[in-house]
Structures are given as C-alpha cells and as structure tokens.
Amino acid sequence: MLLEEIIPPLPDTPCNSPAGKLRTTDKVDAASISTQLSELSELVKNRSDGLEKLIGENLRMIKDMKEEIGRNTAQISGVMETIEFICSEVKDLKERVDLIDSRTKKEEIISIEQEKRLAHLEAYTRRWNLRVQRKKEKMPVRKLSNKGRGIIFQFTSRFYRDAVWRAAKDADFLTENCLKITEDLSPADRARRSKLWPAVEKARNKNKRAFFVGGRAFVDGANNFNSQVQ
C-alpha cells in the first residue's frame, strides 16, 4: 500500500486563513491555570512529604514495637522456664514429702508395736514380783524411787510368788506392822486398772466375782469389757 493512500497530501494552498493571535483573556486564563497547577503541584508535594514522614514514623514505631515484643517474648520465655523449673521442684518436693510421710507412718506403726511389746514384756516381767508397802506411815520414810515407797521382791518361780501372795492376805505380821503386799504393776497396767475399776466395783456390788489379773479385769470369768479400755 502506498503512503499516499494512508496520509492524503496537503492542499497546495490553505483553505482557511491562519489562526488569529491569542487574546488577552486567553493569556490570563493560561497564567491562572499555570498558577493553579503550580499550587496544586506544591500541595501534592507537601502532602507527599507529610505522608512520607508519617510513614517513616509509623515504620519506626512498628520497629520499636517489634523490638519491644521481642524483649517481652524473651522475658515471657524466661518466666515460663522459671515456672517450669519451680513446678518441677515442687513436684519433686511433693514426692519426697509423700515418701517421708509414708515412711513416718510406717515408723509410727512400728513404734506403736514396739511400745506394745515393751509394755507386755514389762508387765510379764513384773508378774514375777511382789511389792511390800506400808498401809499408813507413822513417820517420814525415805523415798525409795519415783514409782512409790516400797520394796520389790522378785521370785524365781511364779508358783512360789503366787503362794506367798495368797498367804500374805491373812498374815498377822503384815496387819500388825501396817504392811500390805501387792502386785508389782507397770504404769500401763495401773492406768488400765484405774479405768476398769468402776466396772469391777459395780460388779462386786452386785455380788459378782470380779477381780484383776495384771491390767485386765474379770467378772464371773469373763473379760469382755477390757477391749473398751486401751
């Protein structure tokens, strides 16, 4: 395709007269528009500078906040580690306390059993003894021991001990000298007798056969109420 077909050739002479000169009003409008454009450009520039400044401040604030968050996160992590350590220590201490408590309970049970065995052994040993005491003192007597005034006789046989005890109940010598022979009771047996005495006395007032053997009381051959006294 030829260039002339795309762009038609210009006429040899202009059809119209050349454009006239710009009028004064047109110059004023152009100057006004130029001024407005300049002011608008300055305004846009100022706004852009303000936005850049605001964005910069926001970026700095965001950076500071990130740093603060990082420090707080590190502190929180440290606190969590401390809490976990303390919880672990508390758990370990609780396990130790539970173990000590369990051992203590076992030791208490063993101690109670040993005390019972010692009390039984002491009571059994004293069954071989008889204690001679004054019924009424006529003059001050030196205190022999913290357990009371008297003399303790220990026999090599329960048979002879019981025989002497039975014979001593009607002995004139003891009566004339204000003496009496009693069992050599342990503190535990004396305490049990003291608690059982009202029941024995009540039984005797009803003409029942009531008596003591060591720290136990019997009424008509039965000792059912002894379990009530520990």
Image (cartoon, grey):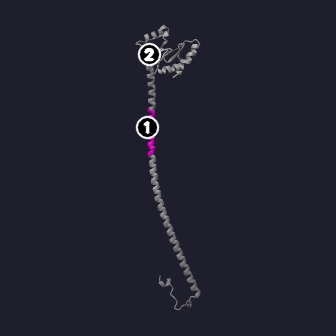
Instruction: Please check the rendered image and state whether residue 91 is part of the magenta-colored stretch, yes or no.
Output: yes
Could you tell me what secondary structure mostly forms the magenta stretch?
A: helix
Q: Secondary structure at mark 2?
A: strand
The amino acid type, in three-letter code, at marker 1 is: Arg
Which sits earlier in the primary sequence, circle 1 or circle 2? 1
Q: Residue at x 51, y 19 (%)?
A: 193
Instruction: Please check the rendered image and state whether residue 117 is part of the magenta-colored stretch, yes or no.
Output: no
Viewed as shown, does residue 110 lie left or right of 225?
Answer: left
Query: What is the crowding at mark 1: few (fewer than 14 residues within 10 Å), some, or many (at least 20)?
Result: few
Above or below, 132 relative to 74 = above
Q: Residue at x 56, y 16 (%)?
A: 201
The part of the chain drawn in magenta is 85-103
Q: Residue at x 44, y 27 (%)?
A: 111
Looking at the rendered structure, which numbered label has been put on residue 96? Answer: 1
Calculate the distance from the C-alpha at mark 1 to the C-alpha at mark 2: 52 Å
Q: Nearer the viewer, residue 62 or 30?
A: 62
Above or below, 11 relative to 127 = below
Query: What is the crowding at mark 2: few (fewer than 14 residues within 10 Å), some, or many (at least 20)?
Result: some
Q: Nearer the viewer, mark 1 or mark 2?
A: 2
State if disc 2 and disc 1 touch (CB < 8 Å).
no
Q: Position of residue 139 (x, y in %)?
A: 48, 16
Q: Position of residue 194 (x, y in %)?
A: 53, 20
Looking at the rendered structure, which numbered label has been put on residue 151? Answer: 2
